[in-house]
Image (cartoon, rainbow, N blue to C red):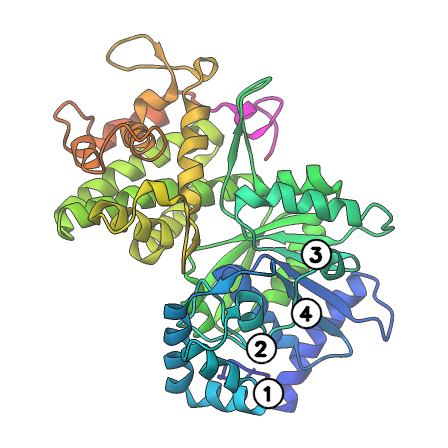
């Protein structure tokens, strides 16, 4: 494949790309003349970039692959964003030429002058994601009618926030009632919900999708990794894991893999999905600490040691062999703390540039998934039925009592009874355990609670 962000160059490169398409088409039972239909649902930064990567790689094979992306209509682009967008366009000769060639440039001039209102679905057609204006993408086919977008899809990419996944896929499920062959769904979403009745357990986006659409769980996969969307589109080297059953994860990993975007595969779907939500929780606190200490490296390292010890503790509750998760979880946490939107959100909250009253859907960033994840993990881990032994008090306590940072974030973000400065008190508490002790505590006790991930017994495999 070529080095640029557009269609591949050279017959040899095209041959390899076409072989990957043909292999997946055969597996999906596609007849000649019937294109493989790939549909993105949700057009946030990662969802848009993921679809743009596929469009760049396979869009030239129009007879074999068709790609479209759904987003809701009617979201207006404000004047300040339109002005910034105009500057971005004029700073990139390739983008400027493309818009002129498509007769699309004039509307951006009119919007810059305040004579016209642009809409998010309209600019996405030209390759501009509202949550990531600074990184122009390739042009995309955008559909604003959900039924039209998904009714005949072979592969659906879920790029929705977890808080919207259930409702949107519930609607999609109604359109699929008459389908004979179930589509394959790849979820990019990293949020979770907590269900407390009849037993406390986590509900992940892939489970929401299965429940809403009745698509077999074998056809639903999760893809995640330590990735920043804009950097991936700009061809920064990155890797990810696609998790699910053997039938689909291996061929899809091959189909999705590009020279700069390496996709591995793993069978452990639910646990990887939950870990993707967990790191968002602690990223918000990391942003707060950075802002409140004027980017103190020492304070950030103290926080990192404490938050990772809490995450390790929680993974021992969720997984019988948590050591397998250490590398992927730490890598994903590290990149999120460095440059993710959840850390950005915590930083802005602590600086007073955002307020909790503004909600968790932020202009130019999309949904801050860590907020709902804080609530879900707190609700789940505060249940007495999951109680663990407190090492000093020598009595049973809810697991959340062993996670002071999680408790503090809940009181700041959800209960709103503490200021952001309280996060510093949480990491400076003189009675706090050495993080090593929490890790040893987790490793030395049988904490695994299979019911949290919906497993019936200790011998069940996730």
- What residue sits right under mark 3 in the picture? 146
**Residue 87 counted in the magenta span:** no
Q: Secondary structure at mark 3?
A: helix
Residue 37 found in image quarter: bottom right
Crowding around mark 1 (Cα neighbors within 10 Å: few <14, some 14 to 19, many 20+) is few
Residue 102 numbered tag: 1
Q: Earlier in the sequence, mark 3 or mark 1?
A: 1
Q: Which residue is mark 4?
A: 67
Q: Are marks 1 and 2 in contact (CB under 8 Å)?
A: yes
User: x and y percent of residue 202 in the render?
Assistant: 53, 31
Residue 140 is situated, as x and y percent measured from the top left of the image, at: 61, 73
Front position among marks 1 and 2: 1
Q: Quadrant of residue 382?
A: top left
Secondary structure state at the residue bearing disc 1: loop
Disc 4 to disc 3, C-alpha distance: 14 Å
Q: Earlier in the sequence, mark 1 or mark 4?
A: 4
Q: Is residue 200 above or below residue 253?
A: above
Q: Which mark is first along the chain, 3 or 4? A: 4
Note whether residue 118 is visible: yes
Q: Magenta residues: mostly which secondary structure? A: loop
């Amino acid at each position: 494949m070529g080095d640029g962000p557009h269609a591949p160059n050279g017959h040899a490169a095209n041959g390899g790309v076409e072989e990957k398409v043909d292999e997946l088409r055969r597996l999906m039972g596609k007849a000649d003349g019937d294109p493989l239909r790939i549909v993105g649902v949700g057009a946030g930064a990662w969802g848009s970039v993921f679809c743009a990567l596929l469009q760049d790689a396979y869009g030239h094979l129009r007879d074999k692959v068709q790609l479209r992306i759904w987003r809701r209509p009617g979201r207006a682009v404000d004047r300040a964003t339109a002005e910034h967008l105009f500057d971005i366009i004029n700073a990139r000769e390739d983008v400027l030429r493309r818009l002129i060639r498509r007769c699309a440039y004039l509307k951006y001039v009119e919007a810059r002058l305040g004579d016209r209102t642009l809409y998010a679905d309209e600019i996405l057609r030209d390759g501009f994601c509202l949550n990531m204006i600074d990184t122009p993408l390739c042009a995309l086919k955008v559909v604003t009618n959900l039924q039209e977008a998904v009714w005949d899809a072979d592969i659906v990419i879920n790029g929705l926030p977890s808080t919207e996944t259930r409702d949107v896929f519930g609607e999609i499920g109604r359109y699929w009632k008459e389908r004979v062959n179930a589509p394959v769904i790849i979820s990019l979403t990293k949020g979770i919900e907590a269900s407390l009745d009849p037993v406390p357990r986590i509900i992940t986006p892939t489970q929401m999708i299965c429940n809403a659409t009745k698509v077999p769980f074998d056809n639903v996969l999760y893809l995640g990794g330590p990735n920043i969307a804009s950097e991936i589109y700009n061809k920064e080297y990155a890797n990810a894991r696609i998790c699910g059953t053997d039938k689909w994860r291996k061929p899809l990993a091959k189909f999705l893999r590009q020279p700069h975007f390496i996709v591995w595969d793993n069978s452990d779907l639910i646990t990887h999905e939950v870990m993707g939500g967990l790191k968002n929780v602690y990223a918000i606190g990391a942003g707060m600490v950075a802002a409140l200490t004027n980017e103190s490296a020492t304070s950030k390292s103290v926080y990192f040691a404490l938050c990772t010890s809490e995450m390790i503790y929680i993974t021992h509750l969720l997984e019988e062999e948590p050591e397998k998760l250490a590398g992927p979880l730490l890598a994903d946490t590290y990149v999120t703390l460095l440059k993710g939107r959840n850390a950005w959100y915590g930083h802005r909250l602590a600086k007073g540039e955002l307020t909790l009253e503004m909600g968790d859907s932020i202009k130019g960033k999309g949904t801050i998934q860590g907020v709902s994840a804080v609530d879900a993990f707190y609700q789940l881990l505060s249940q007495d039925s999951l109680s663990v032994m407190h090492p000093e008090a020598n009595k049973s306590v809810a697991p959340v009592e062993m996670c002071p940072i999680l408790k503090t974030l809940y009181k700041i973000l959800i209960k709103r009874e503490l200021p952001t400065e309280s996060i510093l008190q949480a990491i400076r508490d003189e009675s706090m355990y050495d993080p090593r002790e929490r890790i040893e505590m987790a490793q030395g006790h049988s904490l695994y609670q299979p019911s949290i991930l919906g497993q019936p017994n200790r011998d069940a495999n996730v």
